[in-house]
Image (spheres, rainbow, N blue to C red):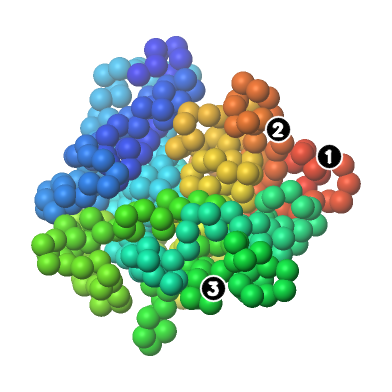
Amino acid sequence: MPPQDAWNGRLLVVENGGWAGGINYPDIVMGLKHGFATMSTDTGHNSTQNDATWSGDHQKIIDFGHRALHLSTVTSKALLPHFYETSSTNPSVFSYFAGCSTGGRQGWSEVQRYPQDFDGVPVGAPANWMTHLPAWDIRVALEQFPNDRSSYIPVSMWTVIHDAVLAQCDALDGLKDGIIMDPTKCASHPEVLLCGRTGVNTSSCLTSPQITNLKRIYTPWWEANNTFLYSGLSPGTDTGWPFLFNGARPQFGVGFFANAVVNPSTWDYMTMNGSTVALADGINPGGINAVDPDLRSFQAAGHKMLGYHGYQDSTIPSLASAWWYDQVQSYYSGMGKINQAEDFYRLFMVPGIQHCSGGGGAWVTGTSSQSGIWPSDNSTDHSMLWSLIDWVEKGNAPEVMVGTKYVGDDATAGVDFTRPYCRWPVVAEYTGSGDVSDATNWKCSVQGIY
């Protein structure tokens, strides 16, 4: 808790340590430095990233799914009056939640289950469809296991694949800088790396089975009867794929499905298919999904939500966030309220950001899961959290925000460049003149598409 004279009159609840549990200390420190009363919870367990045995415990998976965060938030709100006195300076307390990945799922769960808990919620790269995302993690990797398959792509080839994607798509935005501003416009063709083609190096080429495997990774997962199960990874995320595809088994999902969905002693993850997903949907362990598009209670309370996702995310496909945004829009459109969703929920896709942080782009966005690194210009334009606060408390809805890239990703080394990111589905474009490192020389060409 900050001292009384340093408190800004707001409670900031930050995500826990993700799937592994534990407390999120960097974001707690970040919140305290900026005057928030700050809380985090371990959601009832503390394990390792690849240990999911706890998810077979019914009470622990409920805590992780939604209960722990809600009850901790209610308790924190009850404690605040015992630490602080309200005054003309701090007449009321606003509450905010900030999270990315598992924290993004936690934010969505709060908005849907407990819409009164938070006035504002910024959620990044959310794992909110948890009966589908880990299933996709397994299914999309099946052509990689075991590693003696003809379709197996070795670690050494991901950089080659990435370079081929950049050669085809980097300049589509008018600037060749190693950042694909809009991967939805990148129709890359892996066949340029096919072994035997003229000019293709025999030591860095792909066979036909490998190309089929690669296309599978990029392609959304559809099952019978046109049933959509999950988005594919975007071109340009390729250098992060060894983490998912070159381990002893798929990086995510196996433990969760084995312990929380099926029998761990008899289940073979190589059998993952749409039926397994349907089984998980029916169980919804611990109420872990957060995919209810009916946000009317949150809306009626006057609360606000900002979603964001990095286009360079190689852990959770970025277009899963765009798909989910469209589900909310479709729900409101179906009620004849097509323009209402944007009054309280807006999405920003951020070029060049990996999973929550890092990457070649301007990835410092002034929100959670960024190791406590904040923009040098801590204003509403440069900080997603402060932009959300401005929206909640003053009614200024954001259209454009600015990300920061530090030299060597070291905040003490100075700013390398800044770049705007626009409200989905708009993508920033270089104006054609001025320093490309300065966000003021970029523009969001169309606003308010929704």
Q: Position of residue 424 (x, y in %)?
A: 60, 58
CA neighbours of label 1 inside 10 A, class few (<14), some (14 to 19), many (20+):
few
Q: Are marks 2 and 3 in contact (CB under 8 Å)?
A: no
Q: Position of residue 88 (x, y in %)?
A: 46, 19
| Type of amino acid under label 1 | Asp
Which element is circle 1 on?
loop
Which element is circle 2 on?
strand
Q: CA distance from mark 1 to mark 2?
A: 12 Å
What residue is at 40 percent from the left and 48 percent from the top?
101
Closer to the chain start, of discs 3 and 1, is: 3
Q: Which residue is mark 2?
A: 416
Closer to the chain start, of discs 2 and 3, is: 3
Q: CA distance from mark 3 to mark 1?
A: 42 Å
What residue is at 23 percent from the left and 56 percent from the top?
256
Please give left or right for residue 419 compared with residue 308 in the image.
right
Q: Which residue is mark 3?
A: 207
